[in-house]
């Protein structure tokens, strides 16, 4: 089972990170929401990003944080050792993508929602 970390998780149903949690659940994928706001999405507590919560066996990190807010989290993101990082629209970051590739992590500029709907996830 692929475990996905939703980086930038939120309880706001108007946000794409929320829609990703909903769709990952619908498609039967395990997900771990990590964000700066407290709350729960689809029965899972959002883990506090500031505490660098440990998450094991991460297949995918799907990013919903803008590139200007990513640098403080580079070490944490890379330290989760995902197989891949999906840079959703608006989160594209050449610097982080290069660091990830240097660490042997696949990077994609894609949309998690589209990937799920089209069977490319």
Image (cartoon, helix red, strand yellow):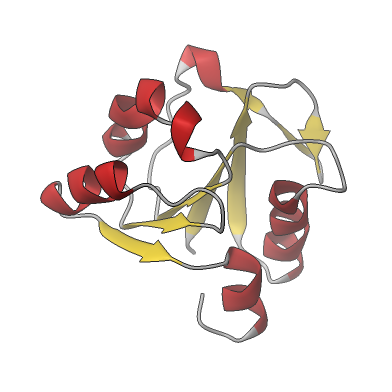
Residue at image coords 38%, 65%: 108
Number of marks present in the image shown: 0
Q: Is residue 26 above or below residue 32?
A: below
- Is 74 left or right of 101, judged from the image as shown? right
Q: Tell which residue pokes out farthest to the top in this image.
A: 51
Q: Is residue 25 above or below residue 114?
A: above
Question: In screen coordinates, is 71 left or right of 105?
Answer: right
- In percent of width and height, residue 114 lies at 63, 76
- The x, y position of residue 5, in whole percent, is 52, 45
| Closest to the observer, 55 or 50 | 50
* Residue 38 picture location, percent across and down: 75, 20
Residue farthest toward the bottom in the current orientation of the protein: 118
Residue at left offset 49%, top offset 28%: 69
Along the line of sight, which residue is nearer the eye, 4 or 95? 95
Q: Quadrant of residue 30?
A: bottom right
The part of the image, by quadrant, that contains residue 55 is top left
- Horizontally, residue 53 falls left or right of residue 71, namely right
Relative to 77, is 34 on the left or the right? right
As drawn, the residue found furthest toward the right would be: 13
Q: Which of the 4 image quarters holds residue 71?
A: top left
Q: Residue at x 49, y 68 (%)?
A: 110
């Amino acid at each position: 089972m692929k475990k996905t970390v939703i980086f930038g998780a939120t309880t706001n149903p108007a946000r794409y990170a929320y829609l990703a949690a909903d769709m990952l659940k619908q498609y039967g994928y395990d997900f771990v929401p990590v964000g700066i706001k407290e709350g729960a999405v689809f029965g899972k507590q959002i883990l506090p990003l500031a505490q660098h919560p440990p998450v094991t066996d991460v297949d995918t990190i799907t990013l919903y944080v803008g590139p200007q807010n990513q640098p403080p989290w580079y070490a944490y993101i890379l330290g989760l050792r995902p197989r891949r990082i999906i840079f959703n629209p608006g989160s594209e970051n050449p610097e982080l993508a290069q660091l990830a590739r240097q660490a042997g992590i696949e990077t994609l500029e894609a949309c998690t929602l589209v990937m799920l709907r089209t069977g490319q996830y």
